Amino acid sequence: MPHVSIVVPVYNAAECLRELHRRLATQVGAVTEDYELVLVEDGGSDGSWEIIQELARSDTRVRGYQLSRNFGQHMAITAGLDVCDGDWVVVMDCDLQNRPEDVPLLYAAAQQGYDVVVAARAERHDGALRRMATAVFYRLFTYLTDLPYDGAVGNFRIMRRDVVVATRQLRERARFVGGVVHWVGYRTGRVTVPHDARFAGRSSYGFRKLAGLALDMILGYSDKPLRITVHIGALIAGLAFAYGAYTFTRAAVYGIAVTGWASLIVSLYFLSGMLMCVVGMVGIYLSRILAEVKHRPLYLIRETTPRRESRESARGPV
């Protein structure tokens, strides 16, 4: 078993892979020669898998896995965590915004007695709108889930094997690796690292995809939206009762005719809209339950790179 595993999800990142491999070989090799690089190709279309196969032929420490289709970044990370063998496991993105030069820093921090060490980004190289949306989302996520998750922390982290084994037991389909690792607990440290610009290409996470991921994360880790709708419904019912009592008293005591048909129609439309929102929210939760009870696999592996020799012979004498 290798001492360190590096798990990297890959999606349309052909231009980054050779540079990623070169820098990881230099940086991780300075810590230990006993490591493996697990590259999980997530159904892209730019020839990334061919480059992974090429890297695996030239370096026996590279292990490649190609998923049968695009299952999503967090499913690809899950696949990597399921197959990695290291005593310590690093998870990082493939676009080199997570710097390979910071892997030794994470490893050194982990040796101080932590089971997990997360990398907090000192400054994100994203647009202002995306940074603002990310900050708002993580505040909302923390409020709805009661998980104090830091928006400066992404996927980049190192974990002891015990933590990886624990996360393998959590098989829900609403995958958010950071939330899963946070939920299992263990002693967690934090280091601040630079956040580089993307080495090449463009991010596959557009606004629509990010919104879908945000919805999955919130609904997968919280039932508070349902409880909030109950409170809103109770508040509206209380206000309606109070207004009804006021109207009845005014008509009975002062003989003032009941008026306000316009406000009545507006109230009906408002309540109808609220009811449809609540029913829709319940429907979304039910659809998540349906997806879970089907017990389909989280991902399917189409192809793997061959392992040409044993890991001991690849390392040579120690």
Image (cartoon, rainbow, N blue to C red):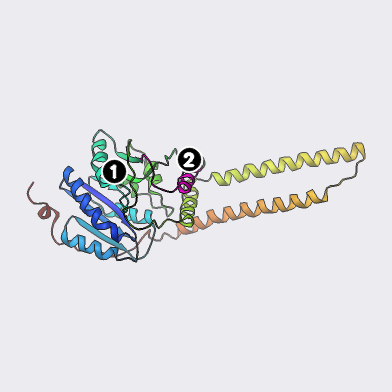
Q: Name the residue: 73% across, 40% down.
A: 239
Residue 209 x/y as whole percent: 46, 56
Residue, far left: 317
Decide whether residue 138 is among the magenta residues: yes
In the depicted view, which residue is nearer to us: 197 or 318?
Answer: 197
- Magenta-tinted stretch: 121-141
Type of amino acid at the residue the image marks with label 1: Ile
Q: Is residue 125 above or below residue 253?
A: below
Q: Position of residue 45 (x, y in %)?
A: 34, 66
Q: Is residue 225 left or right of residue 252?
A: left
Q: Say which element carries label 1.
A: strand
Q: Earlier in the sequence, mark 1 or mark 2?
A: 2
* Residue in front for this viewpoint, 29 or 170: 29
Q: Which amino acid type corresponds to the residue marked 2 in the rendered image?
A: Thr
Q: Is residue 317 above or below residue 251?
A: below
Residue 54, picture quadrant: bottom left
Mark 1, residue position:
158
Q: CA distance from mark 1 to mark 2?
A: 23 Å
Q: Label 2, on which residue?
A: 142
Outermost residue on the top side: it is 112
User: For mark 2, does the 10 Å Cα neighbourhood hold few (<14), some (14 to 19), or many (20 or more) residues?
Assistant: some
- Secondary structure state at the residue bearing disc 2: helix
Which residue is at 77% across, 39% downward?
A: 242
Let me know if residue 216 is in the magenta part: no
**Residue 1 appears anywhere in the view:** no
- Could you say where residue 29 lies in the image, as x and y percent from the top left? 17, 47
Could you say which is closer to the camera, residue 52 or residue 294? 52
The residue shown at (42%, 42%) is 151
Instruction: Mark 1: give few (<14), some (14-19) or many (20+) Cα within 10 Å.
Output: many
Q: Main secondary structure of the magenta part?
A: helix
Residue 53 in picture, x, y percent from top left: 22, 63
- Please tell me the numbered disc located at residue 281: none
